[in-house]
């Protein structure tokens, strides 16, 4: 079984690229392939012009390719700030610097008052933000976000869109954003790629995608945007 | 700050070990033997904790390093004058050289670390059931090599004539040393990363944590402390057989760790002390002892039956152990501050309410948040 076929995708450091598609389209598989959690049968993955197809997930993470997970994957039992500190330590920061950086990131993402809370006790919205803070603590040049809007309520979405934009604007990291939530995709992205059945169905600006009848038939039509 | 708070977490386990050691020094010779074993068991359980507690990976193999430490420290301290007579098949190098008891402890720890490192390089890629079985294989291999290779030791015979110079104080110093190393490790970069990986391996890799490397560090340190414990053991009893450092000891030390709580150093020390005393009592009771007006006389083998049942119940009803897998933070009373004896009990803390007095090591999923001041 091939989950993906002939997919070609490029993310620059100055953009947020959205990746949408129905369930089973291969979105998470693509993230896993790019971040090294899955091995492709064929094909090529490059990071800033260097081929990284054979690199381990750890090496990719240390080289500026960060990711968030669906459903948090936080370090339960560690406090929010420790979750972020550990991420900075993981890519080689000194312990005092890691602590400062973690504080900074939590403040920036509006989690400052939750710093000492157990990560497993955080509400969904904060969990998702903490996942982003942790990924940013590795000082990424590219960030892959796997369904950050999952589990968030409608009023929490604008804050998430701001966080995603700030990754591009303040951290100067390119973002590959995967989500089912068309509102978030359309608002946060500079460019959108539509995946269906393991292939690229369409690619363009949010406006172009919205106007594309094939996309509407395959995907958008089933979701109220 | 974290650093200051962290140090207060070392006070409780250290005080408990010191208390046991001092009490031991003041008692009769027979009880001194018991107390010494309690402290040596604590050293072993701390060694187990360094790997199992921080990594969350089970190992049935750590007693291999105790065995190696015990035989190495024993063999190298038997006076060279008698060594060739009692152990005629030894390699000449082993037969011709001897060291002092103190030096032999370094040898035991060093060999334990080296063996753990070599075994760990391939084994640390494994987790869960596979890790359990593979580490068990290490125990079997070690046991059989020591039991049948008489060029490196006594084989199936007892290794005797080892100087007996470990009493309660020496054992206490050994246990304190092990606790210090364990504490420093869990506060180190490697320890923190390993504890994060224990909670979520995929997420740890995604932030650049090389899990294999940090497990190997913990396994090697654990091997060193286990080797040290073996050295202390052989110098306590003056002899050793391969059976003494094999299955029963593996079971007992794991029971101690489980009962105390494998998530914290405090749990390891409490479990070791409580279960060792219980074990000593139960073994005595198998020969019949009086407890107040009662005469307790248990059938042979009852001690292990009871300890096994205790360990199983603990896993069913309180899997994080009696300490809940948390560190206990003790602080000296301050003037105008809280009074002595009024220690924070983290078990009762509300989960979403950070309280400045407590700092809990990451242990179980259900624990309360750590606070920064």
Image: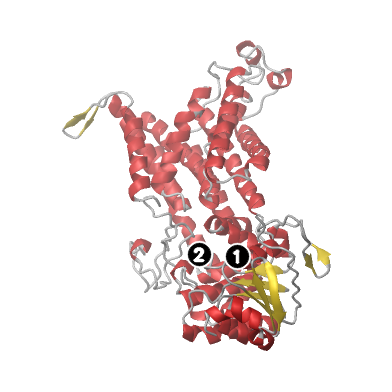
Q: Which residue is drawn at 39% across and 33% down?
A: B34
Q: In this view, does B70 lie above or below A67?
A: above
Residue A200 pos. (x, y %): 70, 71
Q: Where on the picture, by quarter, is residue A168?
A: bottom right
Q: Please tell me which residue is depicted at 62% across the width and 67% down the height of the picture.
A: A25
Dot 2 alpha-carbon crowd within 10 angstroms: few under 14, some 14 to 19, many 20 or more:
many
Q: Residue A44 placed where, x, y %?
A: 78, 62
Q: Residue farthest to the right?
A: A49
- Residue B83 versus residue A123: which sits nearer the camera? A123
- Which residue is identified by label 1? A86
Task: Name the side, left or right, on which A143 lies relative to A50.
Answer: left
Residue A117 screen position, x and y as percent: 46, 72
Residue bearing the label numbered 2:
A78
Q: In which quarter of the image is the C terminus of chain A?
A: bottom right
Q: Are marks 1 and 2 in contact (CB under 8 Å)?
A: yes
In this rendering, does residue A170 appear at all? no
Residue at 47% x, 29% y is B247
């Amino acid at each position: 079984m091939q989950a993906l076929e002939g997919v070609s995708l490029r993310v620059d450091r100055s953009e947020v690229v959205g990746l949408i598609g129905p369930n089973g389209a291969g979105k998470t598989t693509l993230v896993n392939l790019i971040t090294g959690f899955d091995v492709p049968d064929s094909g090529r993955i490059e990071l800033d012009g260097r081929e990284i197809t054979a690199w381990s997930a750890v090496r990719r993470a240390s080289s500026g390719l960060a990711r968030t997970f669906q459903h948090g994957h936080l370090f339960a039992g560690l406090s929010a700030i420790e979750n972020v500190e550990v991420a900075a330590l993981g890519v080689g920061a000194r312990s005092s610097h890691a602590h400062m950086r973690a504080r900074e990131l939590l403040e920036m993402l509006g989690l400052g008052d939750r710093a000492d809370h157990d990560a497993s006790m955080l509400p969904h919205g904060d969990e998702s933000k903490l996942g982003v803070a942790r990924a940013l603590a590795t000082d990424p040049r590219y960030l892959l976000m796997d369904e950050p809007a999952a589990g968030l309520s409608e009023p929490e979405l604008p804050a998430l869109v701001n966080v995603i934009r700030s990754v591009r604007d303040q951290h100067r990291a390119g973002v590959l954003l995967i989500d089912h939530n068309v509102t978030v995709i359309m608002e946060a992205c500079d460019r959108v790629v539509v995946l269906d059945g393991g292939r690229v169905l369409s690619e363009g600006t949010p406006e172009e995608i919205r106007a594309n009848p094939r996309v509407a038939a395959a995907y958008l039509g089933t979701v109220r945007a | 700050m974290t650093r200051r708070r962290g140090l207060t977490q070392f006070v409780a386990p250290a005080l408990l070990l010191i208390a046991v050691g001092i009490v031991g020094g003041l008692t009769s010779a027979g009880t001194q033997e018991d107390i010494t074993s309690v402290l040596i068991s604590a050293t072993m359980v701390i060694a187990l904790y360094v790997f199992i507690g921080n990594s969350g990976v089970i190992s049935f193999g750590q007693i291999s390093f105790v065995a190696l430490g015990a035989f190495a420290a024993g063999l190298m301290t038997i006076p060279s004058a008698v060594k060739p007579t009692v152990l005629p098949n030894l390699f000449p190098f082993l037969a011709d050289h001897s060291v002092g008891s103190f030096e032999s402890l370094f040898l035991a720890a060093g060999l334990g670390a080296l063996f753990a490192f070599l075994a760990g390089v391939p084994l640390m890629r494994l987790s869960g059931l596979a890790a359990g079985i593979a580490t068990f294989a290490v125990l079997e291999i070690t046991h059989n090599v020591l039991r049948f290779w008489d060029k490196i030791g006594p084989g199936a015979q007892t290794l005797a004539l080892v100087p007996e110079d470990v009493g309660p104080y020496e054992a206490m110093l050994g246990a304190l040393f092990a606790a210090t190393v364990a504490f420093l490790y869990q506060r180190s970069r490697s320890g923190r990363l390993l504890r994060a990986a224990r909670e979520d391996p995929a997420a740890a890799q995604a932030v650049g944590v090389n899990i294999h490397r940090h497990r190997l560090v913990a396994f090697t340190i654990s091997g060193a402390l286990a080797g040290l414990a073996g050295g202390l053991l052989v110098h306590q009893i003056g002899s050793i057989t391969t059976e003494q450092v094999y299955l029963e000891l593996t079971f007992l030390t794991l029971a101690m760790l489980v009962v105390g709580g494998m998530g914290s150093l405090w749990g390891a020390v409490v479990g070791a002390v409580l279960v060792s005393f219980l074990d000593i009592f139960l073994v005595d009771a198998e020969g019949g002892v009086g407890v107040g007006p009662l005469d307790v006389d248990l059938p042979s083998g009852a001690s292990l039956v009871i300890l096994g049942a205790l360990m199983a119940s603990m896993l069913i009803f309180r899997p994080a152990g009696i300490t809940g897998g948390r560190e206990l933070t003790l602080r000296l009373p301050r003037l105008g501050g809280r009074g002595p004896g009024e220690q924070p009990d983290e078990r009762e803390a509300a989960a979403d309410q950070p309280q400045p007095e407590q700092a809990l090591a990451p242990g179980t999923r259900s624990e309360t948040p750590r606070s920064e001041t």
